[in-house]
Image (tube, rainbow, N blue to C red):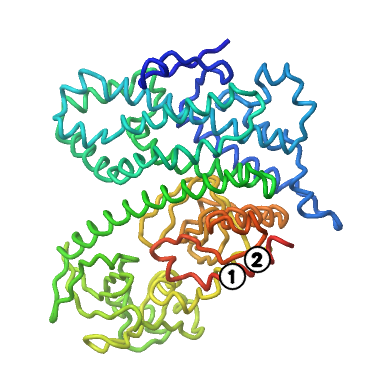
């Protein structure tokens, strides 16, 4: 028998032993990376093996895939235990009594429990190996300790309580009745501690770099701690970011249960409530981080601006940066012959905010503001086909500005057009994104956004493809949360099977109904969607009622 003991919340918890869930050996970082890779491989198998014979119902071709196809990839040394591999389950005869759908549901609920145990194991290393290390403690001031570890102890206590209740549920019966009711309770009562921790994370990273650079004893001690076998080659920062990774992953695990829950069942109702509460927490985390980073970015930009004439106030709670970058402004005749001359172009630097455009000239670290215009008064024009030399050229008109500027720009045309005048090209993007035959891609390599109009992607994310450029960029809408933005085509691969794409849309439709209040799940009605958007994407979205019509059409095909 494997025993998993928890400590830290009173004698009752300290004495509790888990008799069902085996001792977790996998650290959460290992589980997270492996599970995402397995999800990618599973989708590849479905993509390659989907039946193409006519007359086969689409839903049946995907939904009746044997559990082995969906679970075999998890059955390896770097994965968490499967529910069906537990001795108690195999001895009970349940595997011969339950249908495949229920077995997969048991696995989905069991993964939520075991992954929480893995997460807690990693938190324990963060606490005992790093936070409580006496040598490391001596190298840091009290304020630096707080900067680095924030309220991690409160986060740990929340995980302990949560894991205890999950374990107790499994000990009640090896046939798991539900876990989402427990998730909902703890999300309401205890998970607010995640918000404070995640919002502080930006300061955490900055201060960690500062301390590393200026504190030699700390740097030496940290190097020694990171080389310890218990850390398994993982970095200190990989432990610091665990809470945010967990709260977002927990939402996805609940989504997975929701997708599999029988319609109008108690499990579905509990999953909807849990998902809504987790979505609220994740949104508050995102908005808190976004608000802080936006304000810091505006302050940083304002310090670099020099106004040629009338100054424009930059810092505002209602303003944020959408895109910035250098463009080449074309001067003189727009002929193919003169396009070969590099002197034809003058470099300008644009700062595009959600409600303002600044046209500047760069000089070292400073930017001289030549002109400005409200974003609503911008118009873009693609030039008629005049050969390859003009392939990246477009006109930008500032209809109401200081200098009456109309210029021709040479740049990464499509991304700038979408950012400058989004409604022109993207009014119906959201509609087309939810058609069953619209292209989809899955992320095979994590990507962190480098510009405000880009989308950070995690491995196994699925995006509907909205736009692509000839220089290797794609714009997509992530199915599980509606976030949009640009990402490099090298980090994704296309999903070819129409059946798999339709299945992805059906699952996303169910999730969006849950985000919208769950009314459609409980009563069968279909109200409008309220998808979350990135700062850029908020101006790209079409009407929500139009979205719903196409969601309905897609999921019923």
- The quadrant of the picture occupied by the N terminus is top right
Q: Marks 2 and 1: in contact by CB < 8 Å?
A: yes
The residue positioned 18% from the left and 35% from the top of the image is 211
- How far across and down, in percent of the image, does residue 265 sit? 67, 45
Would residue 331 be found to the left or right of residue 49 on screen? left
Which residue is pictured at 60% across the width and 23% down the height?
Answer: 172
Measured in 3D between alpha carbons, the distance from the residue under mark 1 to the one under mark 2, in whole angstroms, is 7 Å
Q: How many marks?
A: 2
Is disc 2 surrounded by few (<14), some (14 to 19) or many (20+) residues within 10 Å? many
Above or below for 398 versus 317: below
* Left or right of 87, for residue 124: left
Q: Is residue 424 left or right of residue 132?
A: right
- Which percent across, then down, holds residue 452? 36, 61
Location of the C terminus (image quadrant): bottom right
Query: Residue 494's quadrant in the figure?
Result: bottom right
| Dot 1 crowding, Cα within 10 Å, few <14, some 14–19, many 20+ | many
As drawn, the residue found furthest toward the right would be: 55
Please tell me whether mark 1 sits on a helix, a strand or a loop: helix
Spot occupied by residue 439 in the image (x, y as percentages of width and height): 62, 61
Identify which residue, 130 or 455, lies in the foreground.
130
Q: Which mark is residue 431?
A: 1
Above or below: residue 179 compared with residue 550: above
Query: What label sits on residue 471 in the rendered view?
Result: none
Q: Which residue is mark 2?
A: 435
The x, y position of residue 354, in whole percent, is 33, 70
Q: Is residue 112 above or below residue 549?
A: above
Q: Residue furthest top?
A: 1
Question: For this view, does 471 lie left or right of residue 63?
Answer: left
Q: Is residue 21 above or below residue 337?
A: above
For the point 51% across and 52% down, the residue is: 490
Element under label 2? Answer: loop
């Amino acid at each position: 028998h494997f025993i998993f003991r928890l400590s830290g919340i009173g004698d009752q918890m300290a004495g509790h032993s888990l008799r069902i869930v085996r001792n977790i050996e996998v650290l959460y970082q290992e589980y997270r990376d492996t599970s995402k890779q397995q999800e990618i491989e599973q989708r590849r198998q479905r993509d390659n093996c989907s039946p193409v014979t006519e007359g086969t119902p689409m839903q049946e071709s995907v939904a009746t895939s044997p559990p082995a196809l969906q679970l075999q990839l998890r059955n390896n040394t770097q994965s968490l235990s499967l529910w069906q591999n537990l001795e108690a389950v195999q001895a009970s005869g349940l595997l011969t009594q339950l249908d495949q759908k229920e077995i997969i549901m048991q696995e989905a609920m069991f993964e939520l429990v075991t992954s929480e145990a893995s997460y807690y194991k990693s938190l324990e290393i963060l606490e005992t190996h790093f936070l409580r290390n006496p040598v490391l403690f001596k190298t840091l001031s009290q304020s630096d300790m707080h900067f680095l570890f924030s309220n991690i102890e409160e986060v740990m206590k929340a995980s302990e309580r949560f894991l205890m209740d999950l374990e107790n549920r499994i000990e009640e019966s090896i046939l798991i009745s539900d876990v989402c009711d427990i998730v909902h309770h703890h999300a309401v009562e205890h998970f607010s501690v995640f918000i404070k921790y995640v919002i502080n994370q930006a300061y955490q990273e900055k201060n960690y770099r500062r301390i590393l650079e200026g504190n030699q004893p700390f740097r030496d001690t940290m190097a020694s701690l990171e080389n310890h076998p218990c850390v398994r080659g993982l970095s200190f920062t990989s432990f610091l970011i665990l809470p945010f990774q967990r709260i977002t992953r927990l939402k996805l695990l609940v989504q997975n249960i929701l997708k599999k829950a029988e319609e109008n069942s108690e499990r579905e109702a509990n999953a909807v409530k849990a998902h809504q509460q987790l979505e609220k927490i994740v949104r508050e985390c995102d908005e808190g981080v976004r608000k802080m980073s936006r304000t810091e970015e505006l302050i940083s930009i304002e310090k670099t601006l020099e106004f040629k004439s009338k100054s424009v106030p930059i810092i505002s709670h209602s303003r944020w940066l959408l895109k910035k970058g250098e463009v080449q402004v074309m001067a003189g005749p727009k002929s193919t012959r003169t396009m070969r001359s590099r002197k034809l172009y003058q470099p300008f630097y644009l700062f595009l905010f959600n409600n303002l455009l600044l046209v500047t000239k760069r000089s070292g670290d400073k930017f001289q503001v030549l002109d400005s215009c409200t974003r609503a008064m911008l118009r873009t024009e693609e030039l008629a086909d005049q050969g390859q030399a003009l392939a990246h050229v477009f006109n930008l008109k500032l209809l109401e500005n200081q200098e009456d500027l109309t210029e021709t720009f040479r740049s990464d045309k499509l991304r700038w057009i979408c950012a400058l005048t989004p409604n022109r090209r993207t009014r119906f993007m959201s509609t087309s994104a939810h058609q069953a035959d619209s292209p989809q891609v899955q992320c095979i390599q994590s990507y962190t956004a480098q510009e405000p109009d880009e989308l950070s992607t995690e491995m196994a994310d699925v995006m509907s493809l909205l736009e692509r450029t000839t220089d290797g960029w794609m714009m997509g809408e992530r199915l599980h949360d509606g976030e949009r933005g640009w990402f490099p085509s090298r980090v994704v691969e296309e999903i070819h099977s129409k059946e798999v794409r339709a299945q992805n849309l059906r699952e996303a439709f169910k999730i969006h109904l849950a985000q919208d209040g769950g009314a459609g799940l409980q009563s069968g009605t279909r109200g409008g969607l309220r998808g979350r958007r990135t700062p850029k994407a908020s101006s790209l979205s079409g009407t929500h009622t139009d979205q719903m019509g196409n969601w309905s059409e897609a999921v019923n095909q």
